[in-house]
Every structure is written in structure tokens, then in C-alpha cells.
Amino acid sequence: SEAAHEAALRTSMRSLGLGESLTLGSGIGTTLSTASAVGGETVVLPLVARNRVIGMLTLGKPSDEHFRQEILELAEDLSRRAALALDNARLYSERTAISQSLQRSLLPPGLPQIPGVEVEVIYRAAGEGNEVGGDFYDLFPIRDGAYGFAIGDVCGTGPEAAAVTGLARHALRLLAREGFGGPAVLERLNAAILDEGSRSRFLTLLYGELWPQEDGSAVLKIVCAGHPLPLRLRQDGTVEPYAEPQPLLGVMDDLELYEQTVTLDPGDVLLCVTDGVTERREGTRMLGDDGLADVLTTCTGLTAGAVAARIMRAVERFASDAPSDDMAILAMRVPGLQKD
């Protein structure tokens, strides 16, 4: 009878040292129905993990022969192992979902459409299951006619580095929209990073303001704090660094930075990358700044999206191994005024 089966199940639970503190979950009806359908000798074992019943294991044989003691002991051992495996799988799924949700919160919600400027971003975090690492990027409206852009690299990988990327990205947006210029924005971010104390991290950062112009060009105000220099591609295929190097963030208290004002002419491309791109290795060979510039010279006439894709393809083909460092590519192109 059902009452007998339930009593036997409670006895089994007590014999496993679970006492009466654990309840027989709502699945008991299904379990007992299964046992009744089998008929004959039936054994029902709770699947217990971390002092919680997460299911039932039902063993039955149609004959009236009793299960041998060694079979029952094996079944109890199997039930413990199965319960732990199931619960670990559940915990892992929950942890993965939480991790991915937190990581996505560190990424920009989306790239704005900038009148007269093409923009493309390619972002790859190293490591299985990582959506965010020590590299980050952002592009956002500051005020009418002005946009902020950034690409950075926090020293290290994993959650600690990702936490600093979140701090940096949100601080950049907040400070820029409060009206601070590039040097003041980065100097205040530097102070915020140092305030983290032992949790602080070195940060290389390229930050700029972008001002599209009526003549089809774009004016940029750039600060390059310890970051790989941005490269400009001209329509004739020439490539040149487009900023001067300055100290990285998270090292010195009294940081004095300056911004440089440059102009992208119609047809020009500005390429910004993190060092996961330039330091891509195959044995003793490294892509390097020169290798990156060589690839960029082949990109004349391409859209910003095609430029970014060609750079990433060259980086992936440079070495056979999977990338061991985070990589970010930000490409901006000024196509110029469209003729009717």
C-alpha cells in the first residue's frame, strides 16, 4: 500500500542518518505510483545532497525475491553519488548564469550611431566561459555633437581585473558627462583606482572625444595613457601613430596628462587596439606594432567593419594556438560627405 511504501521510505531515510528533519518532497506521489506499477520487490531511496532531498531513486523487480544486501548497499552508494552529481550540476549552472550576468553588466549596453562616422568593435575575452576580461572599450554620447570613446587594458585577468574595467568604464562616462576634459577625466580615474588600495590594478587607457564636422571630417581630442598608440590610415595607404605616449594609470598619485587635438580627414581610418593584438605570438615571433601597421596598410577603401574584421583575421592566423590574452579592436572611419 502507499502508506507502507511511505513508511518504508521514512525508515530508509532514518537508516541513512537523515532523521525526520528532511521532508519527502512533492515527488513522493510519482515515486509511489512507479513502485506500485512495478510490483514485486521495490526499494525507494532518497537522493540527498547537502542535507536536502532532491529526488528519489526507485529500484524494483517484478518477482517477489528480496534484494540481496550487497545490492542494497550498492544502491545506497549510487544514490549518494548521483545526488551529489546532480546538485553539483545545478550549482554550476547557477554560478555560470550569475557570472555571465555580472560580466555582461560590465560591457557597454550598445554602440551609438554617430552621424558621419563608421564605428566597429571586435572584443574577445580569453579563457573558457569569460565574456569580460581585463580589456574593455566604450563609445558614448557626451553632449550634442560630441562623443567619448575609450579602449583600455587592466593588468591581469579574471574577476579582479574585470572589476576594475567596470569601475573605469562607468567613471569615464560619468566624468565626461560632467564636463571634464580628457586629462581631468583620466586623472580622476587614476585617483579612483589608487583608492582601491591592494585591489588596485595598473591600467593602460586610450581615451578621446570625437567631434564630427560639417565638412565630413572629424576632430579628435586624445589622451593615450600607457596604451598602444592609435594608428591612422590615410587614403594613400600610409599608416602613422596618431598620439604620443603618456604614463599609465594606477601607478602615480600626481598624474599630469595632456590631450592632443588631431583631425581625421574624409576617408581616414583610426585603429585602436589592446596589446593582446600586438603581442600575439607564434614561438619567438610576435605580430608587434610593425606587423599591425603592415596589415592596416592593406585596408584602404574598406569600411570600418571590414577593417576590424581583417585585423582580427590576421591576428588569428598569425598563431595556431588560441589567444591567451584578451583582445579588443576599435575601428573608426570618416567616409566623408556623400555626393548626390
Image: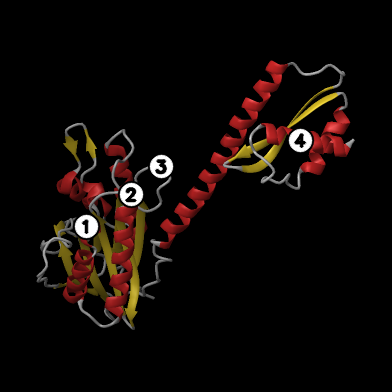
Q: What residue is pinned by disc 4?
A: 9
> Label 2 to label 1, Cα distance in Å?
16 Å
What is the total number of numbered labels drawn onto the structure image? 4
Give above or below for 97 relative to 220: above
Residue at the right extreme?
1
Circle nearer the N terminus (3, 2): 3
Q: What residue is pinned by disc 1?
A: 198
Under tag 3, what secondary structure? Answer: loop
Q: Is residue 16 left or right of residue 8?
A: left
Residue 265, position in %: x, y? Answer: 22, 70
> Label 4 to label 1, Cα distance in Å?
54 Å
> Label 3 to label 2, Cα distance in Å?
11 Å
Circle nearer the N terminus (4, 1): 4
Circle nearer the N terminus (2, 1): 2
270 or 288: nearer the viewer:
288
Q: What residue is pinned by disc 3?
A: 128
Circle nearer the N terminus (4, 2): 4
Give above or below for 51 relative to 100: above
Under tag 2, what secondary structure? Answer: helix
Q: Which mark is in front, 3 or 4?
A: 4
Circle nearer the N terminus (1, 3): 3
Inspect this view and state whether residue 15 appears.
yes
Q: Amino acid at mark 1?
A: Ser
The quadrant of the image that shows the N terminus is top right
Q: How is the image coloured?
A: secondary structure
117 or 111: nearer the viewer:
111
Q: Is residue 293 left or right of residue 159?
A: left
Query: Mark 2 and 1 residues: CB-CB less than 8 Å, in contact?
Result: no
> Label 3 to label 4, Cα distance in Å?
43 Å
> For mark 3, does the 10 Å Cα neighbourhood hold few (<14), some (14 to 19), or many (20 or more) residues?
few
Residue 282, position in %: x, y? Answer: 23, 34
